[in-house]
Amino acid sequence: MKKLVLLLAVFVLVLGVLVACSGNKNNEPANNTSNTGGNTTTTTGGGTSPSSGGDTNTGGEADYRNGFPERVTLEIPVYDRAFEGWNVTDNYYTRWIQKEFGDKYNVEVKFTPIGRSTEVQDYQQLLASHRAPDIIMHYDMPQALNYYASEVMQPLDVNEIAHYAPTYWNNMKDTIERYGVIEGKQMFFFAKRPNVSNWVTIIRKDWVEAVGMKVEDLTSLEKFNEMLVKWRDAGLGTAGGSLQRNVFNYSYAFRNWPVDPETHAIYTDLSVADFTTEATEKWLRNLNYQYNNKLIDQEFYLRDDANKVKAEFVAGRTGTYGEYIASNTDLFEAVKKNNPEAEFAVIPPYAGIPEGGVPQGRADWPFGMIMGINYESSDLERIAVWLYLEWMSQPENLFALQNGFDGMNYNGLDEHGVPIKNEGYDGEAKLSPNNNKDYWCLVIEAPSYGTEEQTIRALKSFWSPPGYEYIVEDMLKYREEVLPYQYPDPLFTVPIESVSKYKADLNNLFQELYLDIVMSPPDQFDAKYEAAKKRFLEAGYQEIIDEKKAAYDAGYILE
């Protein structure tokens, strides 16, 4: 396979970001290094960990594995999900990190809030104003490559990472070296991703049964729509809905199986809708049917973030809702405040699949968070990042961030080494509503406890809200069922420059076109969709198709 030299896009963040590339938050350029040469703070590959002591000099340069002689400020991004009562930049765990890591290494740790639904815009503004954190992060490779193309990240020296973060490096070496090299330069580092997921879509079980059906009856999209008609006629409510934008993985349920590799390579793109495909047409027809028959939230186009979608479910106006579940989610109790008789179940994966289809879906890449170092970060700030990842990679520190503390968050461990949760704990060390994930996601995407079997057993406890353990059991069961039908996005090994050139305009155009089609009378669907496809192709999508086709035919893609 060809070495990854991905550049899916040449993306302009904003004019201010381009201007920012000539500036520096420290008023002088960082002493950037790469694995192909240049000055570096250390030249060894390995060395001792911070906990083992020693100030080994590895090439005439200072060694900071035991800390810095002068205070260094480390700015770490953290997702702000607007959890009620939770301050992402100042809480028990941010103060604990400062005490246990920062004070030990003479580092002032500051947390920069990044809105989960506005992260790209937030980074644009922070970069333009020279206030971006030392880590530039994103979950999806196309956007990470956009940051790279905008020259807001500095090349990395893998020897430096291995020297200052040997535990982290040993965990991620293969992934970093395979996926983190762009145009011959080491640019990205990653968090580990265990093969698990806690995304779940919930349905009001009491509503299903109130119309004479069972959740197990939802074996196809047709059956699901039949149920929604009964909900409407009974005056119960609708299915939930939200505005489709920015992330385009909506069409999997309507694709042909088995997957055609060329079609997948050319049309699958998380950042650009496959608007002209047969799968999209089927998706739009179903939405048009649901909207015109009042089976989905009639103001779905206003639900442009997760909290707005959740509010409709909590209020009892909609009967379906999806989220990343955690043991301390407030979802179920919030619904019960409005309807004490509410019951819940997991929607079977076939409920969204047309008859005869299979539950296709997007598989994750073999890494979690994708990260780069801010081009304005100094050598010492970059080294502080490696020290931070190494500290967090130590099992005892990661365990505390994920589970809290014995005698507070949990009371001892069970026979499998899993914390026995103190379900009534509401003290100062209470975990965030997603179990502090937005802090420890820099090293791993989900908790891991030894073997896969041990991890799954632990995750059931980690994710299961008290009284709703069956939700996680069903979620995991269904995940196993759909795994054979999931596949990752294609990864080209040459620049697909048209994606970056047109994706912003196509995203805006998609919203205009798809809403017009979905909300139109059924007898206007065909004419509107044909005209919309023509506009979409002429707005740049045809160039994207042609460029990807040429790259695919030339073999510039990772299989």
Image (cartoon, rainbow, N blue to C red):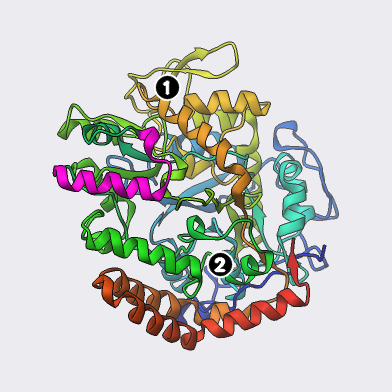
Q: Residues at badges 1 and 2 in contact (C-beta under 8 Å)?
A: no
The prevailing secondary structure element of the residues shown in magenta is helix
| Extent of the magenta region | 215-235
Q: Is residue 205 above or below residue 219?
A: above
Residue corresponding to mark 1:
409
Q: Nearer the viewer, residue 229 or 275?
A: 229
Q: Does residue 284 belong to the magenta stretch?
A: no
Q: Is residue 403 above or below residue 374?
A: above
What's the amino acid at mark 2?
Answer: Asp
- x, y (%) of residue 164? 72, 46
Q: Nearer the viewer, residue 365 or 26?
A: 365
Q: Residue at x 23, y 72 (%)?
A: 521
Q: Is residue 334 above or below residue 420?
A: below
Q: In which quadrant will I find the N terminus?
A: bottom right
Residue corresponding to mark 2:
269
| Nearest to N terminus: mark 1 or mark 2 | 2
What's the amino acid at mark 1?
Answer: Asn
